[in-house]
């Protein structure tokens, strides 16, 4: 389906003749995100039981870059080495954390790993790895794979809630928090001139296609990081309410350099930070309700789609 969609959308024309290598690398990056959502972690925990193997298997997560870059003549050792270092060092640190703190408490190793992953995304350190228009975000997927493998297979952290098998309760909670957040966001956004109403009527394909894309490539990665990992670990030390507030502030600050258009200036976007911080409270509430990322990802995705279509 992905292969047919690639050609149907004419997206392949942007890839300068390197469609196959790009598609294979994308498939390899998406595979862990998909299969970890259906119980792959439990299988790998039993299969990869040796400490040395667990750490070095993580190096395979850097392979999609080489698969793309070598045929495309875009390979750079600096980028490949950076990916390998993050994969292997993160795996080693999380192995150390599990041995030292178990699966119920956080440690300094978690701080180092999460800071490295978060800053790599926020500062766009690997954005040039896939240099073609529309695929530069694939480096973000590789870092998501590292987080999933590291925390589900090696660290075995409790309570992340990464499960892509949908439940009715996820939809109910996700939409409930969206409805709670919407009037606050609209009033503040219009007052601050951050939101601007557009009375368009999108096609069903545009709405649902955009919703699925946002869910997979934006909401799931960000909810895994901020709610499943950061808020989850902070809660063990600071409690539910303080961890919710701290995570929401961190989530807001992660949007400090987000552009609102092609020609938008880059700087500290305080309006975006402020509204994203408030949004983070409701995303965190959705995750806390059942400790499931599916619920917070539904809230997150719906907010982004409504904003992108009618209020951007």
Image (cartoon, grey):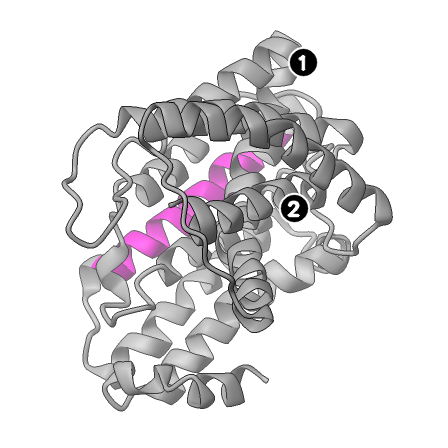
Which residue is tagged 1?
Answer: 240
**Residue at the location (71% across, 24% down)?**
104
Q: Nearer the viewer, mark 2 or mark 1?
A: 2
**Residue at image mark 2:** 298
Q: Is residue 89 magenta?
A: yes
Give the crowd class for mark 2: few <14, some 14-19, many >=20 residues within 10 Å. Answer: many
Question: For the residue labelled by badge 2, is the local secondary structure a helix, a strand or a loop?
Answer: helix
Q: Pinpoint residue 249: horizontal percent, then vertical percent.
A: 44, 19
**Quarter containing the C terminus:** top left
Q: CA distance from mark 2 to mark 1?
A: 21 Å
Q: Residue at x 49, y 66 (%)?
A: 29
- Left or right of 62: which side holds 238? right
Q: Farthest residue to the right: give it.
A: 168
Q: Which residues are magenta?
A: 79-98
Quarter of the image with the N terminus in it: bottom right
Q: Is residue 243 above or below residue 38?
A: above
In this rendering, the answer to whether 54 lies above or below 23 is: above
Question: Who's the residue at 57% across and 42% down the image?
Answer: 300
Q: Looking at the magenta stretch, what is its main secondary structure? A: helix
Q: Is residue 67 left or right of residue 43?
A: left
Q: Is residue 100 visible?
A: no
Out of 108 and 184, give the one closest to the viewer: 184
Q: Residue 295's spot in the image, x, y percent?
A: 71, 41
Horizontal and vertical percent position of residue 165:
79, 56
């Amino acid at each position: 389906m992905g292969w047919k969609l690639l050609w149907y959308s004419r997206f392949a024309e942007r890839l300068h003749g390197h469609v196959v290598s790009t598609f294979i690398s994308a498939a390899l990056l998406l595979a862990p995100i998909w299969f970890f959502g259906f119980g792959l972690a439990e299988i790998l925990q039993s299969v990869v039981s040796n400490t040395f193997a667990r750490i070095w298997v993580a190096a395979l997560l850097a392979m999609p870059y080489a698969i793309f870059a070598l045929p495309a003549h875009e390979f750079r050792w600096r980028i490949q080495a950076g990916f390998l270092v993050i994969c292997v060092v993160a795996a080693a640190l999380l192995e150390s954390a599990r041995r030292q703190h178990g699966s119920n408490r956080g440690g300094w190793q978690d701080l180092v790993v999460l800071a490295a992953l978060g800053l790599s995304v926020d500062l766009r350190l690997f954005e040039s790895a896939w240099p073609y228009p529309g695929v530069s975000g694939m480096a973000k997927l590789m870092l998501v794979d590292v987080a999933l493998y590291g925390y589900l297979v090696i660290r075995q952290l409790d309570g992340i809630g990464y499960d892509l098998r949908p439940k009715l309760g996820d939809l109910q909670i996700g939409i409930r928090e969206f409805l709670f957040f919407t009037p606050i966001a609209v009033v503040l956004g219009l007052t601050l001139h951050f939101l601007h109403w557009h009375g368009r009527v999108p096609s069903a394909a545009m709405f649902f296609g955009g919703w699925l894309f946002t869910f997979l490539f934006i909401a799931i990665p960000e909810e895994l990081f901020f709610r499943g990992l950061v808020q989850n670990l902070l809660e063990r030390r600071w409690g539910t309410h303080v961890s919710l507030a701290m995570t929401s502030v961190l989530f807001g600050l992660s949007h400090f350099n987000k552009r609102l258009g092609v020609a938008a200036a880059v700087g500290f976007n305080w309006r975006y930070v402020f509204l994203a911080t408030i949004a983070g409270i409701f995303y965190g509430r959705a995750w806390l309700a059942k400790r499931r990322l599916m619920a917070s990802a539904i809230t997150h995705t719906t907010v982004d789609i409504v904003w992108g279509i009618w209020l951007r």
